[in-house]
Image (spheres, rainbow, N blue to C red):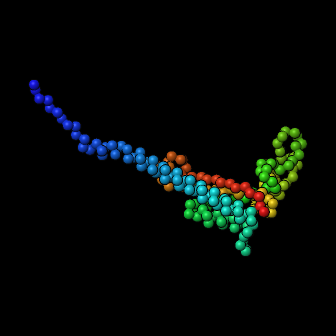
Amino acid sequence: MPKRSIRRMDNKGSVAVEFAIVAPVIILIFVGIFELGMLELSRNCLELAAREASRIGITGRTPANTSREQYIKDTVQTITAGYFQPSRVFVTLWVYSSFNLTDPEPWTDTNHNGTWDADEPYTDVNKNGHWDGNMAASGAGGPGDVVRYRITASRPYLTPIWKTLMGDGDAHFMVEAVVKNE
């Protein structure tokens, strides 16, 4: 009976090939997790800033020679300093008389079309000189006023992969807090 030649399969180098196939996927997953973690950290930073801004607004405490609005904006800038460039953080304050934040300024619907038209009389509740679909006035308000704090910010993504995938290369954030002043 002839002898059969038994050849052993040579596995040398197969681990390197498998690693070369799997490593980019694993690295991409880790980079994605890191970027998502930084995005969440940035959002949490803005939420903290909105909470602190509203707390300052509620209590009305401010240092001497500083307006409450400016102190609120300075506090937001201080809290967000490590995560966002100051030129990319915007604080907007709106004052309402109640928690109904969507009512338009009252007007007389003379033509009965259900919408305000330029020739119809209205009550300028926020005293800005024109009719608004939202009665909010800007500022931090006074005692008993309802104030809506909106902080918008943007920052560049940390990794080039996300910059490519997400279009404009920036992560955009917006947080709000609505509180009633003491």
Q: Residue furthest bottom?
A: 64
Residue 117 placement, left or right of 159: right
Residue 5 placed where, x, y %?
14, 32
Residue found at x 65% / y 54%: 175
Q: Residue at x 73, y 67 (%)?
A: 68
Residue 66, placed above or below residue 144? below
- Image check: 180 left or right of 29? right
Which quarter of the rendered picture does the C terminus lie within?
Answer: bottom right
Q: Residue furthest front?
A: 1
| Relative vertical location of residue 167 with respect to residue 71 in this rendering, above or below | above
Is the residue 5 above or below the residue 97 in the image? Answer: above
User: How many tags in the picture?
Assistant: 0
Q: Is residue 40 left or right of residue 7?
A: right
Q: Is residue 24 visible?
A: yes
Q: For residue 144, which quarter of the picture?
A: bottom right
Of residues 136 and 113, the one drawn nearer to the viewer in this rendering: 136
